């Protein structure tokens, strides 16, 4: 039976057989004895996105009182949920993201803690996922941004929108009013040059 550790673009944690291409964490939010989630959905404002393999280390998922292993379809999904690259296992990506985040948001010498504070305010509204108005027309959003419409999540890629699922993406136009899932400060980092890693199905859907 799949564990409850897969993340949707809205930040929900659910059980599904699809593992995804990135892992990450929000601190310790599980009971290792039962390998089940606690009532809380984060224990730290540092919501990280990590690589699934790092220096040959192997972990038995949710088996000890250490950070709770969460899984994402791809990096765009993780960003939409409010996560950012880990400075330990993804050091180069984390530095590139911070540089783009600083440029896009008009700040400098930003600590990871300060960035996490901004992201935490943007990702949550009284404990639930915060949706934001689109900062620009849908077709002008940078690649990798995700939006929500009619309770479906969509990825902006090129001049198209791709509908998200745990299995991957398929081409589908957004036909209703959309709200922004990806935190606005992260969108500005995308505008400043950071490109999130997409699941292979995105390229297939784009043809």
Image: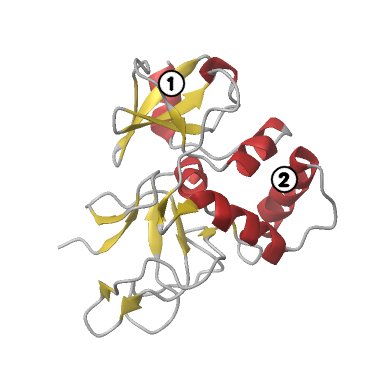
Q: Is residue 127 left or right of residue 144?
A: left
| Residue positioned most to the front | 126
Identity of the residue drawn at 40% across and 67% down: 69
Tell me residue 22's x, y (percent). Answer: 46, 53
Identity of the residue drawn at 76% across and 63% down: 111
Where's the C terminus, which quadrant?
A: top left
Name the one closer to the observer, 111 or 169.
111
| Residue positioned most to the right | 108
Q: Is residue 128 above or below residue 64?
A: above
Identity of the residue drawn at 45% across and 52% down: 125
Secondary structure at numbered mark 1? strand
Q: How many marks?
A: 2
Q: Is residue 137 above or below residue 143?
A: above
Tell me residue 83's x, y (percent). Answer: 53, 54
| Cα–Cα gap, marks 1 and 2 | 24 Å
Q: Is residue 180 above or below residue 100?
A: above
Name the one closer to the observer, 15 or 104.
104
Identity of the residue drawn at 63% across and 60% down: 116
Secondary structure at numbered mark 2? helix
- The residue pinned by badge 2 equals 101
Disc 1 residue crowd, few under 14, some 14–19, many 20+, Cα 10 Å: many
Q: Earlier in the sequence, mark 1 or mark 2?
A: 2
Tell me residue 148's x, y (percent). Answer: 39, 32
Q: Is residue 164 left or right of residue 106?
A: left
- The residue pinned by badge 1 equals 161
């Amino acid at each position: 039976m799949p564990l409850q550790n897969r993340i949707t673009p809205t930040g929900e944690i659910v059980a599904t057989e699809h593992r995804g291409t990135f892992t990450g964490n929000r601190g310790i939010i599980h009971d290792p004895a039962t390998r089940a989630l606690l009532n809380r959905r984060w224990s730290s404002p540092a919501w990280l996105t990590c690589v699934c393999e790092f220096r040959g280390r192997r972990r038995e998922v949710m088996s000890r009182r250490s950070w709770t292993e969460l899984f994402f379809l791809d990096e765009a999904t993780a960003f939409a949920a409010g996560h950012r690259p880990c400075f330990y296992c993804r050091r180069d990506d984390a530095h590139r993201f911070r540089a783009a985040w600083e440029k896009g948001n008009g700040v400098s010498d930003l600590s990871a803690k300060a960035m996490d504070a901004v992201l935490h305010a943007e990702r949550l509204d009284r404990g639930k996922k915060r949706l934001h108005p689109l900062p620009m027309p849908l077709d002008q959003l940078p690649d990798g941004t995700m939006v929500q419409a009619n309770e479906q999540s969509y990825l902006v890629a090129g001049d198209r929108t791709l509908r998200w699922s745990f299995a991957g993406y398929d081409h589908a136009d957004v036909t209703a009013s959309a709200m922004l899932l990806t935190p606005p400060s992260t969108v500005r980092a995308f505008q400043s040059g950071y490109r999130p890693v997409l699941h292979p199905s995105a390229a297939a859907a784009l043809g």
